Image: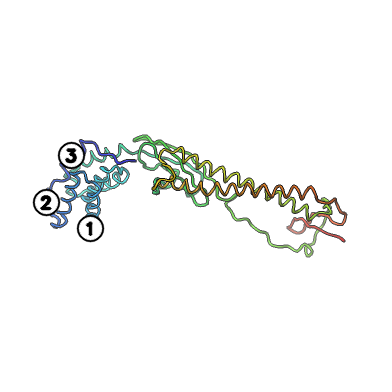
Amino acid sequence: MKPIRLSQAVLVAAALGLAAPRVGAQVPAAPSVESRYQEGADLRERQQDAQALAIFQELYAQTREPRALAQIGMAEGALGRWLDAEQHLSEAIANADAWVGARRQALDSALATMRAHLGQLDVQTSAQGAEVWVDGRRLGSANSPLRVVAGTTSFEVRAAGYASVARVATVPAGGLARESVTLTPTSASGVAPVVPPHVDLATVPSTTAPLVAASGGGTRRTLAIASLVVGGVVLAGGVAAWSYGWSLTSDYNNDPACPAPEAAALPAQCQSRLDSARTMEPLGWTGMLLGAALVTTGAVLLGTAPRESPGQSVRVVSGPGEVGAGLRVEF
């Protein structure tokens, strides 16, 4: 969002209260530190808040004073960085020193103004370990309310082993918005297939019973069926990939926060959506073409396979703890 100034009343109160010298019995800071505080306050009065913020951040790294943290929160609020502003100002008030305590009323008023620009977003998903990201920044885990800037918010849900999903939510100021998101596993099952150990059927005591006669063109039929099955899976995967890429492109085009793709700089969520679409759509076309070719090949092989030969048969094999299928070929 574009930076938004704090309300005029709060800004005037802060300028008068926060730029004042220290009061009470608090030990004054070293002159060099105090001069930096005054420099930052002067920049705030001239509305050069970004430069003032850099000074107050340096002071906080040096002194760890709640005073510096409060000034950081006020500068961030003036720049419209509402989440950071609320966090830093709340922390400064919670750990108030004499300087913060003397200006508590002005700081509380500024904090209320900051909170008026915030709401909560509750993203519900069944994916384990899912996280919510906004503008390339991790807000926290899904399935619990998170603080966000009120208004139209673009967010992304990420989880290991799942394709990320980008959405747009409208969050009311001071209210709660709930979104339900379904994440799709990046593989069919998300679990590596278990390959059974090789068993030599000749060494296993077994009983056999005829199941179905294999044709004399058994090898060709086997290849045909394999080609049909694999081709169908690849074709379905290609359709799914292309559809997902198309949906990402549609979401990008319909998102007012996303500029034209040729823009010099794109928001993080827009760039992620565009990169994924550029990957998935060509992958989908490749899968559809390859799957169609395999299905066509399987159909041709199946249609041209020779008729049944009595020299081959397929039998069910059962033994102690084992059930399987074996192919016996006789000449």
Secondary structure, mark 1, is helix
The quarter of the picture where residue 122 lies is: top left
In the displayed structure image, the side of residue 183 where residue 290 appears, left or right: right
**Which image quarter is the N terminus in?**
top left
Residue at which label 1 appears: 62
In the depicted view, which residue is nearer to us: 57 or 231?
A: 231
Could you tell me residue 272's position as x and y percent?
45, 48
- Say few, some or many: other residues with alpha carbon within 10 Å of mark 1 (under 14 / 14 to 19 / 20 or more): few
Secondary structure, mark 2, is loop
Residue 13: mark in rendering = 3
In the displayed structure image, the side of residue 103 where residue 193 appears, left or right: right
Q: CA distance from mark 3 to mark 2?
A: 23 Å
Circles 1 and 2, Cβ within 8 Å, touching? The answer is: no
Which sits earlier in the primary sequence, circle 3 or circle 2? 3
Residue at which label 2 appears: 25
**Which image quarter is the C terminus in?**
bottom right
* Discs 3/2, front: 3
Residue at the bottom extreme, as displayed: 203
